[in-house]
């Protein structure tokens, strides 16, 4: 039994590591059906250029409109907006207006302790 648990832990670790966030997500579109042959993508502005935020494909699970990984993003304040784009086979790409701005802060890493020592007092 112990061996089975170890094997399961080894198999699940990569899945859990891959699922680590954080993610910038948007709710799926409601009441809109993508015409046959067309696709939806999303553009997000306000993120560092290291994050690929243009033509993000729709989330295949339908849980979110998109889920954009923010792992490794530098500390600081960010204000992002998003838009939905319909990629029509005949007419090309047509995009919605920008969403309302959404702001968040990535905290900075704390500094290490300046000194560590042993003392007889607390």
Image: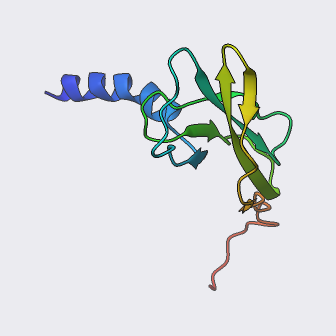
* Front residue of this view, candidates 109 and 98: 98
Please tell me in which quadrant of the rendered image residue 31 appears. Answer: top left
From the top left corner, tell me how far across and down residue 45 is, in percent.
Answer: 81, 45
* Front residue of this view, candidates 9 and 91: 91
| Colouring | rainbow
Look at the image and tell me whether residue 106 can be seen: no
Tell me if residue 99 comes above or below residue 67 in the rendering: below
Q: Residue at x 76, y 57 (%)?
A: 109
Tell me if residue 39 comes above or below residue 45 in the rendering: above
Look at the image and tell me whether residue 77 can be seen: yes
From the top left corner, tell me how far across and down residue 91 is, in percent.
Answer: 73, 19
From the top left corner, tell me how far across and down residue 67 is, in percent.
Answer: 57, 39
* Front residue of this view, candidates 93 and 100: 93
* Front residue of this view, candidates 89 and 101: 89
46 relative position to 119: left or right: right
Please tell me in which quadrant of the rendered image residue 3 appears. Answer: top left
Residue at the farthest bottom position: 121
Q: Residue at x 72, y 28 (%)?
A: 55
On-image quarter of the N terminus:
top left
Q: Residue at x 67, y 23 (%)?
A: 87
Residue at the farthest left position: 1
108 relative position to 37: left or right: right
Tell me if residue 28 comes above or below residue 18 in the rendering: below
Q: Residue at x 81, y 48 (%)?
A: 74
On-image quarter of the C terminus:
bottom right
Residue at the farthest front position: 90
From the top left corner, tell me how far across and down residue 43 is, in percent.
Answer: 74, 37
């Amino acid at each position: 039994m112990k061996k089975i648990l170890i094997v399961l832990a080894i198999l699940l670790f990569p899945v859990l590591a891959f699922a680590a966030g954080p993610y910038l997500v948007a709710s799926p579109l409601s009441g809109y059906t993508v015409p046959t042959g067309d696709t939806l993508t999303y553009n997000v502005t306000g993120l560092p250029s290291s994050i690929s935020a243009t033509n993000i494909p729709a989330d295949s699970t339908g849980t979110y409109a998109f889920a954009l990984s923010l792992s490794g993003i530098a500390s600081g304040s960010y204000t992002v907006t998003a838009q939905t784009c319909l990629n029509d086979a005949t007419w090309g790409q047509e995009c919605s207006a920008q969403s309302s701005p959404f702001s968040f802060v990535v905290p900075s890493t704390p500094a290490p302790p300046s000194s560590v020592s042993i003392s007889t007092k607390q």
